[in-house]
Image (cartoon, rainbow, N blue to C red):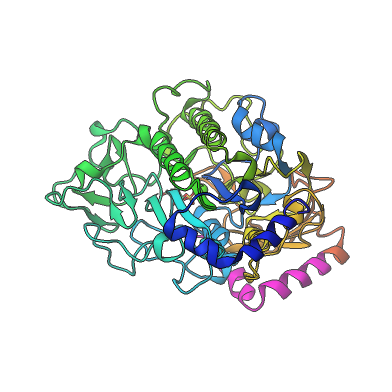
Amino acid sequence: MKNFKPIFFLLCFAGLMACESSRKQTPEAPPEETRKPNIVIIYMDDLGYGDVSAYGATELSTPNFDALANGGMKFTNGYASSATCTPSRFALLTGVYPWRNKDAKILPGTAPLLIDTAQATLPKMLRSQGYHTGIVGKWHLGLGTGQVDWNKQITPGPNEVGFDYSYIMAATQDRVPTVYIKNGYVDNLDPNDPIEINYDQNFEGQPTGKDNPELLKMKWHHGHNNSIVNGIPRIGFMKGGESAKWVDEDMADKFLEEAKSYVRAHKDEPFFLYYAMQQPHVPRTPHPRFAGTSGMGPRGDVIVEADWCVGEFVKTLEEEGLLENSLIIFTSDNGPVLNDGYYDDAVEKIGNHKPAGPLRGGKYSLFEAGTRVPFIVSWPGVIQPGTSGALVSQLDFFNSIASLTGSDEKAPDSENLMEVFLGESDKGRSNLVIEATTRTALRHGDWVLIPPFKGPSKNEQVNIETGTAPDYQLYNLQSDIGQQQNLAGANPEKLKELVQIFESIRGEDYGNIKQLELK
Ligand code: NG6
Ligand code: CA
């Protein structure tokens, strides 16, 4: 932080007024030394700990992810808050544990906005510090208040919780509506062909993945058998909106172009860009120029594609002279999965690749691979490259970035770890509660406690261990990163200590959560 403090003082003198007026009048850019750093979060969807060469992948090459890792701080104990998307995104933007919000579960495309418009958010906080704020990519935090008319302004959404600009997909690539939404309006919508969405029943006469397999270019394995868009069966039913439907193979290019344009449009003011990429979530649809490039089928190909996108994006920052003054965070919303509902060769062509690296479990799992993810912080002008084993979470972005940019706002579950993120300290969190499909566990030092839960020990559809067992599990990650040896019986003292810490954080809810059936 030492390099930044003088800048911060200057800024204090320049005053907030100057920042505010620069947002409205777009005067000349202030000299580089007095500029607050741009903040970029590149958020991958289902990218595993072992999917990046810098984290040990040998069968896949990810030179552009690696360049961020090798030029910045690479965290080996960095966590998403949850093993699925919506709760992790909620935590990332609010600094609040998702288990405090009972609705923070994987949302359908018709779900209402999950974040209260009165709630503090990372983009709101940055806006108050003089930043322009934008999101490009996957949202999946709900839109509207219940009944959305997709043909009118869709609100509240990202623009009502702190983003000045938004270009998003509503939920996931496998869920309807399969359209882009720009600042609350469906992009390219023909008013004569209105969109209708229903998650319960089909519209009369519309083909489905279930009934019309002859229309499919990608086959469904589980779920994903409702409306067909571009030959791909989806979750949910959709009618109309032909001109607005995205082309899956073009999605990566589309979001990249949007992210680049955002940077170019806001290069003269400090900006926060949340670039939420869709890869390698299903359906995996690489652009033809990446198809076959990984030798691992579409899952590998879209990772190669995403790596290229990151390279192009960083190049844009460089071309605009912004790279030295941009803090770039690269991470993922949850761990990896191979078969997440389509037959796409992910299982068949995996070869020796290990998407979870040495970790146990995967997406949906309370074992490490559910939430421990690639986690890189780069700031070329400031951070000395290095690797850190400090315990850090995406929850911590809120307080850390607040302190960096001069805000005294704090979010309830966020810790100010800016010195850790900048490589100036290795003192991370003492405790972190992780979450998988509403069940929670505790990381404390090198130890992990998984309390007893009802429910199957394996999610058979995706072929991933859930981490669920009827008895306490206690693992020492220092000596047993693969969580093979349950030490609960052999180490009752440690078990007791962790149970106490866990229950003190989780509070009374824990008793209910403990009894929940696996969803
Ligand atoms: C699940 C979907 C899965 C994926 C996931 C959300 C089925 C059977 N499975 O319900 O394919 O869409 O939701 O993934 O429908 S996430 O990364 O956005 O959390
Ligand atoms: Ca995800």
Could you say where residue 262 lies in the image, as x and y percent from the top left?
44, 45
Q: Quadrant of the N terminus?
A: bottom right
Could you say where residue 285 lies in the image, as x and y percent from the top left?
40, 32
Q: Main secondary structure of the magenta part?
A: helix
The reply to whether residue 470 is in sight is no
Q: Residue furthest left?
A: 192
Note whether 356 is above or below 102 in the view shown. Answer: above
Name the residue rendered at 47%, 48% in the picture. 266
The reply to whether residue 456 is in sight is yes
Asked if residue 501 is among those painted magenta in the image, a careful observer would answer: yes
Could you say where residue 107 lies in the image, as x and y percent from the top left?
42, 59
Q: Residue furthest bottom?
A: 508
Task: From the viewer's side, name the closer residue of 129 and 328.
Answer: 129
Name the residue rendered at 51%, 35% in the picture. 316
Task: From the viewer's side, name the closer residue of 317 and 288.
Answer: 317
Note whether 347 is above or below 188 in the view shown. Answer: above
The answer to which quarter of the image holds residue 116 is bottom left
Could you say where residue 189 lies in the image, as x and y percent from the top left?
21, 48
Name the residue rendered at 33%, 65% in the picture. 155
The answer to which quarter of the image holds residue 377 is top right
345 vs 245, left or right, is right
Task: From the viewer's side, name the closer residue of 309 and 111.
Answer: 309
Task: From the viewer's side, name the closer residue of 455 and 234.
Answer: 234
Q: How many marks overall?
A: 0
Q: Which residues are magenta?
A: 495-519
200 vs 358, left or right, is left
25 vs 242, left or right, is right
279 vs 179, left or right, is right
Asked if residue 38 is among those painted magenta in the image, a careful observer would answer: no
Name the residue rendered at 64%, 39% in the picture. 356
